[in-house]
Amino acid sequence: AQKITQTQPGMFVQEKEAVTLDCTYDTSDQSYGLFWYKQPSSGEMIFLIYQGSYDEQNATEGRYSLNFQKARKSANLVISASQLGDSAMYFCAMREGYNNDMRFGAGTRLTVKP
Amino acid sequence: EAQVTQNPRYLITVTGKKLTVTCSQNMNHEYMSWYRQDPGLGLRQIYYSMNVEVTDKGDVPEGYKVSRKEKRNFPLILESPSPNQTSLYFCASSFLTGATEAFFGQGTRLTVV
């Protein structure tokens, strides 16, 4: 069964605007971690942000924040003040507490328009 | 510099010719894994290892082998590559806790003709 769902294959945003990339997950474990990675056209995987299941505050890292809604099992990535360099593929991922496997969603391709 | 190093970055080979993609990390991570990335499917785990001499299958292990003889190295072996193994491959490593991110290699783009 798919554990991570990213329903937006592609998104467009105007430069300097904010954008939300959706991610929902499925787990019966109480302890888990949620991650977002960025993959630019050069192909490398860049870690952006982490949210633990017991963290009460939403994680933030510079222009990135994670809108964590535990009851809805969603972990949306919010990018504020989009820049042209934000154009990339974005992956949501989860590690469940009982093992270390990191499962990924299908990804969302974000294009920032000037 | 902390890093995961994969080689080669690009490889074109023919069906049936055995190949090995190397992966090495310098962060003393216990956990290492291999993924393949295909359009529309995200990253799917092939094999993983939680320690030396301990390996296990991921979601798509068919046609692949791995070994973990040393903590830092985790090579991926394709004994008889087929065109459906044409993909972008990533090696990743992390500590043995769900609270830490995985570090990825630069990726290996494999084409099997």
Image: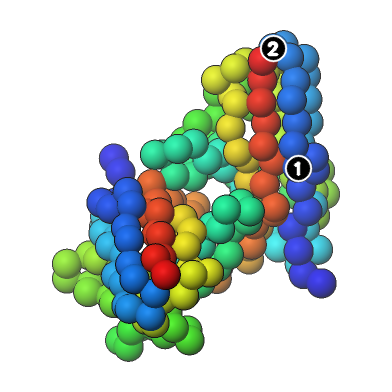
Q: Residues within 10 Å of mark 1 (few under 14, many from 20)?
A: some
Residue B63 position within the rendered picture, expressed as x and y whole percent measured from the top left: 61, 21
Q: Residue at x 49, y 70 (%)?
A: A84
Please state which amino acid type lies under the numbered disc 2.
Thr
Q: How far apart are marks 1 and 2 (CA)?
A: 19 Å
> Do dots 1 and 2 share one subunit?
yes
Horizontal side of A36 relative to B110 (left or right) equals left
The quarter of the image holding the C terminus of chain B is top right
- Measuring from the top left, give residue B90's x and y in whole percent: 63, 46
* Residue A31 visible from this viewpoint: no
Residue drawn at (28%, 75%), measured in percent from left and top? Answer: A68
Q: Mark 2 points at which residue?
A: B15
* Residue that badge 1 annotates: B9
Q: Mark 1 lies on which chain?
A: B
| Residue B35 visible (yes or no) | yes
Residue for point 62% across, 15% down? B82
Mark on residue B110?
none
For marks 1 and 2 on the same chain, the one whose residue lies earlier in the sequence: 1
